[in-house]
Amino acid sequence: MKLQTTLFFTAFLLFLTGFSKAQKPVSDTLAYAKKFETNKDKYRGKPFSLLMKDMTQLQFKKAKSDIKQDENNPLPSTLFRFSDKDISAGNEVTFVIKWKPDPSSTIPLELFQEEHNYGFTVSERNFFDKKIIADIVVYKQ
């Protein structure tokens, strides 16, 4: 009986140790974001949904797209932030995705940005999910 209790307790502690490591918060946002920039070859030519699937520890909170009047490429890039601060705030980690040229309409995105004050909501995520990533650049202002 004592052996079973010891085994159970040991297994329980191992479980908690593994769980706590899996849920470890990101202490260095720039280093976390740079990992994706370093591995950007994995994401080039792939849909945005793959990047979002891999971003398990920290998600985007704000997004501002560079919308142009170019009918062949109206959405060249989007700037993402991990903070709830104003999108134009300085000293923030900035994650820029340059998109593969796509002539589809940006009107829904423009409306989402206005309505949600650049908050990265489910609506924005759904809009970007099938967009193809051309490049990733990460920097801190």
Image (spheres, rainbow, N blue to C red):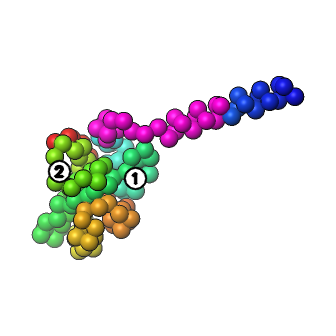
Quarter of the image where the N terminus is located: top right
Badge 2 marks a residue whose secondary structure is loop
Image side of residue 66 versus residue 25, left or right: left
Instruction: Report the quarter where the C terminus lies.
Output: top left
Residue type highlighted by circle 2: Ala
Q: Position of residue 128 (x, y in %)?
A: 33, 62
Of the pair 102 and 137, the residue shown nearer to us: 137
**Distance of label 2 from label 1 (alpha carbons):** 24 Å
Q: Which mark is residue 52?
A: 1
Label 2 or label 1, whichever lies nearer to me, is 2
Within the magenta stretch, is there residue 95?
Answer: no
- Residue 138 vertical position relative to residue 87 in the rendered view, above or below: above
Q: Which residues are magenta?
A: 13-34
Residue 89 - label: 2
- Please tell me whether the stretch drawn in magenta is mainly helix, strand or loop: helix
Crowding at dot 1, Cα within 10 Å, few <14 / some 14-19 / many 20+, comes out as: some
Residue 55 point in image, percent of width and height: 41, 47
